[in-house]
Amino acid sequence: MNDMLKAIIERRSVKKYKPDMVPQELIDQVIEAGLYAASGHGSQSPIIVAVTNKEIRDRLSASNAKILGQENIDPFYGAPVVLIVLADKSKPTYVYDGSLVIGNMMLMADSLGLGSCWIHRAKEEFDSTGGRAFLTLHGIEGDYEGIGHCVLGYSDMEKTPPPPPRKKNRVYYIR
């Protein structure tokens, strides 16, 4: 089997992390993979906000949990790194472009021995007054929409689950 296909098939979302911080050089490699994602018209509209500060990470988690309606949980599953992907709403392909960034980062994380998981609710989080204030406070200006959070860390799951069977009748060939 092709190595890339094998990686795609075997990558799983991790939902339990060790508290150990990921070395900066690994975070940078994951981010670089995201920056090389395809984008409509080569616009490269998505940006990545890398959060490794525990206090800020915990505030983002609390905000995300509130949006989820379950304020007593950590929707980031204990991951010490949060890579927030936002994209420029003026680009017609911004949601797709940002989604590809997250997909690339998740595959790269897996190839580096890191766990990752796509966490939703970034749209709601960064459309809020608090979310906009967070971006402004950190010098991020523009008409961005939150696409998702890619959380990273070392897996604390005992066993990686096998991929579920693929549903039938999802491919149609027109020849």
Image (spheres, rainbow, N blue to C red):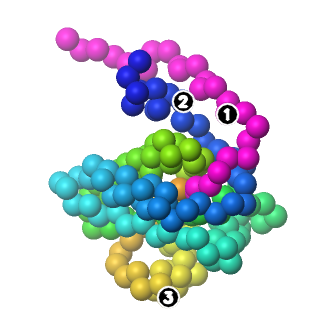
Type of amino acid at the residue the image marks with label 3: Leu
Prevalent SS, magenta region: loop
Residue under circle 1? 160
Mark 1 Cα-neighbour bin, 10 Å: few <14, some 14–19, many ≥20: few
Q: Which residues are magenta?
A: 151-175
Which residue is at a point 37% across and 52% down the rendered structure image? 33
Residue 99 pos. (x, y %): 41, 51
Residue under circle 3? 137
Q: Could you tell me which secondary element the residue under label 2 belongs to?
A: helix
Mark 3 Cα-neighbour bin, 10 Å: few <14, some 14–19, many ≥20: few
Which residue is at a point 40% across and 27% down the rendered structure image? 3
Is 96 placed left or right of 59 in the picture? Answer: left
Q: CA distance from mark 1 to mark 2?
A: 9 Å
Give the number of the mark in front: 3 or 1.
1
Is 126 placed left or right of 80 in the picture? Answer: left
Name the quadrant of the N terminus: top left
